[in-house]
Amino acid sequence: MKSQDVVEQDQAIQPQMVSVEIEGKRYQVPAGITLMKALWYTGKNVIRGAGCLGGFCGACATYYRTKDDPKVKTCLACSKAVEDGMSFSFMPAFPARKASYDLIQLKDPKQDLFELYPEAPLCRNCNACTEACPQSIDVREGVWKAVFGDFKAVSEMFMDCVMCGMCTPVCIADIAPNLVALYASRAQGVHFTDKPEGLDTRIQEITDGKFNQDWDRVMKLSDEELQNTTAAAK
Ligand code: SF4
Ligand code: SF4
Ligand code: FES
């Protein structure tokens, strides 16, 4: 039989548990772990939906609701901690329409937006996309910036977009704001942003094979030689 001390020690290392509902089924999980860890803790075999685990890849888009609040919210499962009474489920793959285009061939990218994404100007300002964004991007504003041709602002505003897609199913105008922003950002980069001085020269040098010998030499280095070379260069 355990002494009182051992019992108290055992209790001390027991994590505090909270009750959560995952895909409609209730579980007890340790307080403070992420939603993703709660999925693993309860034995779920997460194949689609687990990526970087650091809030960068957008793979773990999740719907959740907290106790006593009827509003369903969105988050990244790897970056949100469980709360007692919370319900959550992964967001299923959403069939958003992705326009296909060859950026280089576009003659008038700002006008072409209306052919590629004709629904973009139909935004009804509901702001649901902004509320759904786990990266706190002003998505609604970004859509309008794209519509009015301010692709530079869009590319800056969506710098932190992780392409989780959570702004899309909530859109009452059937816009995929993230894809509109992606198009505007790409077009900005290819057609409107000034290239850094010397970039074309360097690309030409690479194309002409100026660095091939150096590459061949580096590719043959062992890990140790590579580390020594890197250390010497510092
Ligand atoms: S803009 Fe959309 S896709 Fe990008 S992070 Fe926000 S919700 Fe996700
Ligand atoms: S969810 Fe759609 S309609 Fe609503 S503000 Fe965003 S883009 Fe506009
Ligand atoms: S797993 Fe990459 S953002 Fe969550």
Image (cartoon, grey):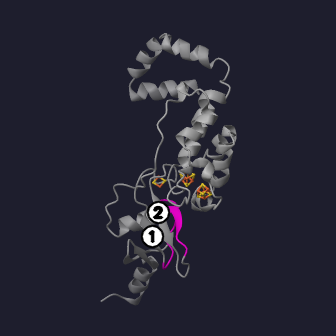
Whether 75 is among the magenta residues is yes
Q: Is residue 211 left or right of residue 25?
A: right
The residue where tag 1 is placed is 88
Q: Amino acid at mark 1?
A: Phe
Q: Nearer the viewer, residue 32 or 117?
A: 117
Is 142 drawn above or below residue 152 in the view shown? below
Q: Nearer the viewer, residue 135 or 216?
A: 135
Q: Residue at x 43, y 24 (%)?
A: 225
Residue at 52% in and 62% down? 75
Q: Report x, y in % for residue 120.
A: 59, 48
- From what the image shows, is residue 134 above or below residue 191? below
Q: Main secondary structure of the magenta part?
A: loop
Q: Quadrant of the C terminus?
A: top right
- Residue position marked by numbered label 2 in the rendering: 62
Give the secondary structure at mark 1.
strand
What segment is highlighted magenta in the picture?
71-85
